[in-house]
Every structure is written in structure tokens, then in C-alpha cells.
Image (spheres, helix red, strand yellow):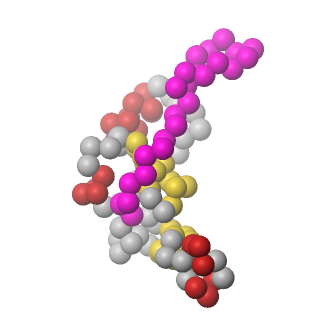
């Protein structure tokens, strides 16, 4: 989405990623911790509490170019093509980690 920043003549865009895909590969990730009844958060039981060294199952992603992972929306996943496009335009505020 185009964004106007008052006092700044340069054009800016903002990405709004609202698509969630259930694709975290628990077995291939370094560590996956889910909420349990003992944690005292009954509304969160079974959901991700922490994901380290996250890996995704590409078979679940399909042709999605940008999305967030269901259950761990901290992660913003972009395709390799989109990664290269962002690097070409010298996008700021991004850091890429292969998943």
C-alpha cells in the first residue's frame, strides 16, 4: 500500500500481510514449545508458545508469495522471488532467514 509521510518527498509503501498458513514443520524445527494446561492459560493450550529454528513445510505453502505462519504470526515469510525483489530495491527494515 502506498504511504505518504509528511515532510518526506520520497514514495513509501507498507506491506500488510494478513494471510495465515498452517505450515510450521514441528519435527524439522529446532525447538517447538506449545502451551499446556500447566501453564495456566487454558485459552492457549495447544498453541505455539515458542518456535526456535523454525522450518516450514513447503508443501503447505502452495504459490503464496508472502504470508504469516498460523500459530506463530511473529514470522513474516516471503518467497525467494520476493526476497530478491526487496534486495534489488534496497528495502529497509528487513532481515532474511531461510526457513
User: Residue lying farthest bottom?
Assistant: 38
Q: Is residue 89 visible?
A: yes
Q: What residue range appears in magenta?
A: 1-24
The mark tally for this picture is 0
Q: Percent x, y for residue 81?
A: 33, 36
Q: Residue at x 27, y 43 (%)?
A: 63
Placement of 37 over or under 79, stated as above or below = below
Looking at the image, the residue that sits furthest to the right is 7
Rendered view: 4 above or below 65: above
The residue at 28%/57% (across/down) is 60
| Residue 46 located left or right of residue 66 | right
**Residue 37, how many percent across, how many down?**
58, 85
The verdict on residue 91 being magenta is no
* Chief SS of the magenta region: loop
Q: Quadrant of the C terminus?
A: bottom left
The quarter of the displayed image where residue 8 is located: top right
Q: Quadrant of residue 70?
A: bottom left
| In front of the other: 44 or 33 | 44
Horizontal side of residue 67 vs 14, given as left or right:
left
State the image coordinates of residue 24 (x, y, percent, origin top left).
39, 64
Amino acid at each position: 500500500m502506498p504511504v505518504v509521510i509528511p515532510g518526506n518527498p520520497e514514495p513509501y509503501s507498507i506491506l500488510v500481510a494478513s494471510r495465515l498458513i498452517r505450515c510450521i514443520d514441528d519435527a524439522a524445527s529446532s525447538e517447538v514449545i506449545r502451551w499446556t494446561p500447566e501453564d495456566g492459560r487454558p485459552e492457549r493450550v495447544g498453541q505455539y508458545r515458542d518456535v526456535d529454528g523454525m522450518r516450514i513445510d513447503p508443501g503447505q505453502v502452495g504459490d503464496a508469495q508472502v504470508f504469516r505462519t498460523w500459530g506463530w504470526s511473529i514470522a513474516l515469510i516471503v518467497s525467494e522471488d520476493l526476497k530478491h525483489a526487496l534486495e534489488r530495491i534496497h528495502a529497509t527494515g528487513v532481515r532474511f532467514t531461510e526457513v
